[in-house]
Amino acid sequence: MSIIKSAFRVLRFGSAKNQLFSLESKTCRAFSVCNKLRQDASDANASKINFYVDENKEKGYAILKLNKGPVNSLNLEFLTELNIQLEKFEESKEIKGVILTSSIPNIFSAGLDIMEMYQIKQDRGSQFWTALQETWIKLYGSNKIYIAAINGHSPAGGCLLSISCDYRIMSKGPYKIGLNETLLGIKAPFWFRDTMINTIGYRETEKALQLGKLYSSEEALAVNLVDELADSKDLITKAEEQMSKWCAIPTVARELTKSSMRRDTLSKLIAQREADTQSFIEFTQRDSIQKSLRMYLESLKKPKKSSA
Ligand SMILES: CCCCCCCCCCC/C=C/C(=O)SCCNC(=O)CCNC(=O)[C@H](O)C(C)(C)COP(=O)(O)OP(=O)(O)OC[C@H]1O[C@@H](n2cnc3c(N)ncnc32)[C@H](O)[C@@H]1OP(=O)(O)O
């Protein structure tokens, strides 16, 4: 049972009963919108492999490798597929934890697919944002143990995936991680911000978000944005060692502890998912935001200077 479900179960018997029933039904409505998308995604992507899952039932954990070239950018279809997989993990009796990594050398995830925000129709934008909210709720609210093995760049939405896990190991190397939204001319949503605050603290987040700071792996370690660094070749071994340690902790006690730490942050988004989606639509439709996104896209597409 996910943290969200257990939170509802506990609180259903308390004084906030009615409020929470309405909150729960809003969440269910949003989930049911995604059901059709899930079917479409599984039909449309039947031939593409956007991630690999390697389950080791004997050891009790799985490795999920993101594989959507070129940079694991998160679009509606990819998020929808991921949500189905996260749900499978959550329901599995054999899997206690998941190592989240990428099969693309030097890239963990480039974050949200910018094309989902640029000149996009309202319907699609709304489906996209709902799917992203669901990914975060499933990941941050999971009862399972998630360890991020960050094998490369992890900006913005890539950073959100990482900080939604329970433990982070990052490859040593010239890689960057952080919430750089202000550099794209956009504001990080409150739940990105709150997840960051829960990871590195208020003051560091305040600076990092205003500056759109992308941390080097050493800087990330220094502010606890990641918990450990590893040579690239040792990354998965280190993640597996850490996973064994976490798997050895009494499950119910660990789950309850995790839930108690994350419940308030999760409830804040769950209580206002629709309003958050409306804000996203309204914000991304502004001319000034579209202009910033266009300039950012152009800068990404510019031919790169040769390193030779
Ligand atoms: C009132 C307020 C209410 C709230 C409103 C909310 C507002 C919305 C908030 C949204 C939050 C946003 C979160 C995000 O995640 S935005 C995305 C941020 N990501 C980035 O800035 C990363 C950009 N990419 C890079 O820096 C590099 O690509 C990277 C370092 C990851 C890899 O570099 P590399 O040199 O290996 O690869 P290329 O740059 O050549 O890229 C290869 C191709 O991929 C395209 N690309 C890269 N990133 C993205 C992306 N995020 N989305 C779409 N496409 C991407 C890139 O253009 C290249 O394409 P071409 O091969 O066609 O040139």
Image (cartoon, rainbow, N blue to C red):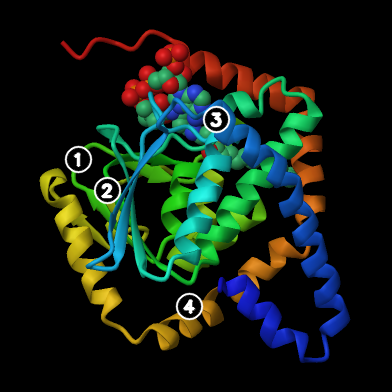
Q: Is residue 175 above or below residue 96?
A: above
Q: Amino acid at mark 3?
A: Asp
Residue at the (55%, 21%) spot, across then down: 296
Q: Residue 45: x and y, percent?
A: 51, 28
The local secondary structure at tag 4 comes to helix
Q: Is residue 136 above or below residue 21?
A: above
Residue bearing the label numbered 4: 258
Q: Are marks 2 and 1 in contact (CB under 8 Å)?
A: yes
**Which mark is on residue 113?**
3
Q: Amino acid at mark 1?
A: Gly
Quadrant in which residue 303 is drawn: top left
Q: Residue 308: x and y, percent?
A: 15, 10
One can see residue 46 in this view: yes
The local secondary structure at tag 1 comes to loop
Q: CA distance from mark 4 to mark 3?
A: 30 Å
Q: CA distance from mark 4 to mark 1?
A: 31 Å
Q: Is mark 1 within 8 Å of ligand 1?
A: no
Q: Is mark 4 within 8 Å of ligand 1?
A: no
Is 60 on the left-hand or right-hand side of 302?
Answer: left
Residue bearing the label numbered 1: 173
Q: CA distance from mark 2 to mark 4?
A: 26 Å
Is 148 on the left-hand or right-hand side of 271?
Answer: left
The local secondary structure at tag 3 comes to loop
Q: Is mark 3 within 8 Å of ligand 1?
A: yes
Which of marks 3 and 4 precedes in the sequence?
Answer: 3
The answer to which of 239 and 308 lies nearer the viewer is 239
Which of marks 1 and 3 precedes in the sequence?
Answer: 3
The local secondary structure at tag 2 comes to helix
Q: Amino acid at mark 2?
A: Ser
The answer to which of 212 and 172 lies nearer the viewer is 172
Q: Nearer the viewer, mark 2 or mark 4?
A: 4
Q: Residue 236: x and y, percent?
A: 19, 52
